[in-house]
Image (cartoon, rainbow, N blue to C red):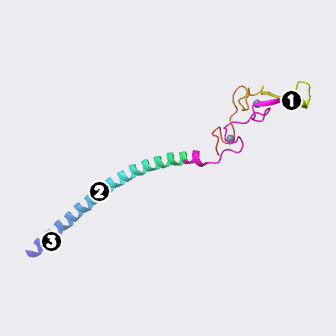
Amino acid sequence: MELGGGGRGAGDRVRRQLQSVGRVAAYLGGGFLVLTAASSVAVRSLRALSDANQRKFAMPCGACEGKGSYACRLCRGSATVEWSPMHDPVFVSPCLCPTCDGTRLATSGRVQRCLNCLGKGYA
Ligand SMILES: [Zn+2]
Ligand SMILES: [Zn+2]
């Protein structure tokens, strides 16, 4: 009789332990969900931060000197061309570049985007 009673007690103890294990598992599961949400938020903010850093600290594009588009080929980015009416070097006078209209950018109808940095101005 006493043995049987003891057996029932052991079973109760096991059942209680299983219940507490279940509680811990549920707690861990909830914590995991919170962690996942938190880490996704952290990753998103980190990505935004690194993007800002890249813009701030990145080297300007070498192909377009950070302009995002190529310099005008005729005036080489100076916006003016030296024009001499008499082909006389004494009377050379700077005038507005007729190709880029002083915008200093290479245009062919529209501004040509730099292919090296895709128009971002930094690489
Ligand atoms: Zn020009
Ligand atoms: Zn570029």
Seen in the picture, residue 2 relative to 55 is either above or below; the reply is below
Whether the magenta-drawn stretch holds residue 42 is answered as no
In the image, 73: left or right of 112?
A: right
Q: Secondary structure at mark 1?
A: loop
* Image coordinates for residue 22, horizontal then vertical, percent: 26, 59
- Which numbered disc flags the more N-terminal residue, 2 or 1? 2
Label located before the other in sequence (3 or 2) = 3
Residue at x 75%, y 34% (from the top left corner): 78
Q: Are marks 2 and 1 in contact (CB under 8 Å)?
A: no
Q: Main secondary structure of the magenta part?
A: loop
Q: Which residue is mark 3?
A: 7
Instruction: Using the image as rendered, state which of residue 120 and residue 21 is in the foreground.
Output: 120
Residue sticking out furthest to the front: 90
- Coordinates of residue 28 in the picture (x, y in percent): 32, 57
Q: CA distance from mark 2 to mark 1?
A: 83 Å
Neighbour tally class for label 2: few under 14, some 14-19, many 20 plus, Cα within 10 Å: few
User: Which numbered circle lies on residue 92?
Assistant: 1
Is disc 2 placed on a helix, strand or loop? helix
Amino acid type, callout 1? Val
